[in-house]
Each structure stands twice: as structure tokens, then as C-alpha cells.
Amino acid sequence: MKVEAKKTHGLSSSSEYKIWDLMIQRCENPNDKRYKDYGGRGITVCHQWHDFSSFYADMGSRPDGFTLDRIDNEKGYSPENCRWATPSEQQLNRRKVKGSKSRFVGVTKRPSGRWSARITVNYKGIYLGDYDTEEEASEAYQKAKEKVLEEFELMRKQRGIQ
């Protein structure tokens, strides 16, 4: 898909414009080093967002310390699937690690055969415990994730961020 001609909007040096341009490149440009993880696996940019002004109208100004995040990592960039998020929120919104022996995010198999649960919050790994089953470890991770996301949601409301 071709990116529409850039219109004069006075924001070409803004962080929002740089984020928009990087989004377009990783999804549309096979020569971009991140293309294989985005465009190469089917992640697209909705038609209206090929125009920066439309992207900016939908997303608004980037809050300090926030970056563009896809809510569902299997879907593309569109108004209904994107938000401004902190790096810590993004850390919780990840796909399962390639090559992991577990079917679940946040769960690894120990040499002992037990399953370990770990979550990362504010760049700090938090050990949640070892469990007999992969499902128990995943449940511990999901409960911890829900609690952290509730705290993030409260922070968003206090800062007036949607």
C-alpha cells in the first residue's frame, strides 16, 4: 500500500510524526530491519493512517514517557487497536517468547520439571513462584498481570489519559 503524500501540518519534527513514520516503515518497507516482525508477519497499518494527519487526529499528542502500543499484538495498527502506553504496560502486552517450552507468556520450565512464573514491571523482574503445572504458573502470572493493569488504569485516570 502506498503512503499518501505528506501534507503540511507543522508536526514533521514532532515525536508523534517520528513514531508514525517508524510504524509505516516497519509495516510497509521490506528493507526495514524490523519488517520481518511486523509487515513480514502480516501486521498492517489501516488505510486512513497512511496519512499522518489522520493518525494524529485519532491518537492525539503523545503523553510524556508513552509510546505507541497495539492492544492486540496479532492485529494491525488502527484507531481501535492502538493506544499510548508506558513501556511497563507494553512489557505486559507481549507475545509468547519464540522457542519457549511453555504455551503461556510469563511461564518457563525449570530443570526440576516445575513451572516458574515471572512478571516484569517497571523494568524489574518479579518472581511469582514455582508450580506443579504450567496452567497453575500461568494463572499466577495472569492474576499478577490483572493487578498491575488495574494499577496502570488508575494511573491513567489520575493523569487524564485514555
Image (cartoon, rainbow, N blue to C red):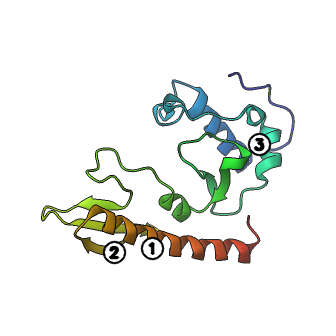
Identify the residue shown where x is 47% and y is 32%. 33
The label on residue 1 is none
Q: Which amino acid, by three-letter code, is at mark 2?
A: Leu
Residue 60 image point, x, y percent: 79, 53
> How far apart are the alpha carbons under marks 2 and 3?
39 Å
Q: Which residue is mark 1?
A: 144
Tell me which amino acid carries mark 3: Phe
The residue singled out by tag 3 in the image is: 55
- Front residue (pair 139, 108): 139
User: In this rendering, would 70 be left or right of 120?
Assistant: right
Image position of 101 with respect to 32: above or below = below
Which mark is drawn over residue 128? Answer: 2
Of badges 2 and 3, nearer the viewer stands 2
Picture quadrant of residue 75: top right
- Helix, strand or loop at mark 2: strand
- Give the CA separation, mark 1 to mark 3: 33 Å
* Viewer-nearest residue: 97 or 85: 97
Q: Is 31 or 134 nearer to us in this picture?
A: 134
Residue shown at the point (64%, 72%) measured from the top left? 153
Q: Is residue 121 visible?
A: no
Q: Residues within 10 Å of mark 1 (few under 14, many from 20)?
A: some
